[in-house]
Amino acid sequence: MKAAVVPRYGSPDVIRVCDIAKPEPGADDVLIRVRATTVNRTDCGELRAHPIFMRLFYGFRRPRRMILGFDVAGDVEAVGRDVTAFKPGDRVFGMCPTRRPGAQADYVCIAETGPIAHMPAGLGFADAVVCEGAYYADASMRRANPQPGRKIMVYGASGAIGTAAVQLAKFYGAEVTAVVATKHLELAKSLGADRVIDYTASDFTKIGERFDFLFDAVGKLSFTRCRKLLKPDGVFGSTDMGPWGSTLLLVLWSALTRSGRVVVHLPRVSARAFVEFMRDRLAAGQFRAVIDRTYPLDAIADAYRYVETGQKTGIVVIAAPAADENTR
């Protein structure tokens, strides 16, 4: 089978698309023919393993896993002898566990009890590789208690995490203000945002409104700049360390002082439960994929280069050629 192999840390130039042995499913494994996967910020971070302390998780001298890719959608080709929930021919989607090879290959094995589920009927494979960004967004949305009457601002509401945050916050019933660039105004409205602000046209921190939760979906804001946007008990949440690591330092300070004002939320819902949650949202039309570009596996290095520009909208898909009529 073909796979995008990462033999060492570095730029997208180190990725090699080559032939390797097809995985054999264990007794409780599901072998999936990959029809679509993604390249996202997490993949880029794992590729470069920067800052250096990230190698404590990924492998110090070289990557522990040489095939990346969290999101997956495809057909079940074979199952292990103990598998009962899936059978060959089933269309499935989900996330690849970080301790096993990822989905940037023709085939991947995932345990039956892992984060996979049957795809909703009629959904295209490319429209199903949405879980990774939504997993992180949902962690923050759940902790923000986004019930009716709660006001949430999503900064950077055009990326994989940001578009997911807007849709999930609306599903939970919150009032959502999305902050995006000019070209993404209509997108944010189409995702259900109650109010959309163009940060290139004016200073969004001076709108004279306060929020229960401000979610920085791209990790570029500082708490100091946004403090006046928060209610007295409002919380600032981010997906990253922030400028010069300022958010990480404030997260530690908030934990020590127990103020809870600055947070980086990690998922608390099991990955399997979350994939099942997303299956229901997709089936009900309460969540949709926002696809920026689609690349073949042979051009995956170009996909990484594009994602690293920080300019993508929604997700960047790696799709098998002509998998079926529903694959973009």
Image (spheres, rainbow, N blue to C red):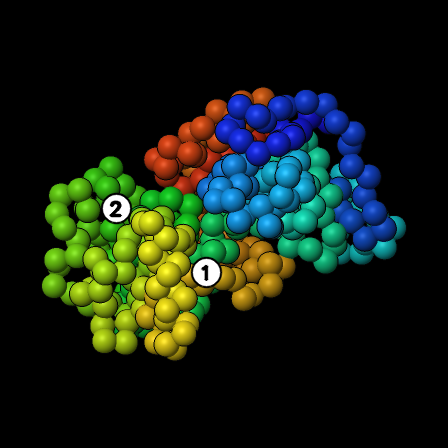
Estimate how packed mark 1 is, as few (under 14), some (14 to 19) or many (20 or more) residues with alpha carbons within 10 Å: many
Regarding residue 72, the answer to whether it shows in the image is no
How far from the left and from the top, in percent, is residue 89? 73, 41
Residue 33, quarter of picture: top right
Estimate how packed mark 2 is, as few (under 14), some (14 to 19) or many (20 or more) residues with alpha carbons within 10 Å: many
- Residue 52's label in the rendered image is none
Above or below, 58 against 6 in this view is: below
Above or below, 193 against 88 in this view is: below
How far from the left and from the top, in percent, is residue 164? 41, 52
**Residue at the disc numbered 1:** 138
| Amino acid, disc 2 | Val
Residue visible at 25% across and 51% down in the picture: 179
| Quarter that holds the N terminus | top right
Badge 1 marks a residue whose secondary structure is helix
Question: In the displayed image of the protein, which residue is found farthest to the right?
Answer: 81
How far from the left and from the top, in percent, is residue 237? 36, 62
Foreground pick, 293 / 120: 293
Badge 2 marks a residue whose secondary structure is strand
Above or below, 232 against 51 in this view is: below
Residue visible at 33% across and 56% down in the picture: 246
Residue visible at 27% across and 56% down in the picture: 222
**Residue at the disc numbered 2:** 180
| Amino acid, disc 1 | Asp
Residue 228, quarter of picture: bottom left
Foreground pick, 94 / 207: 207
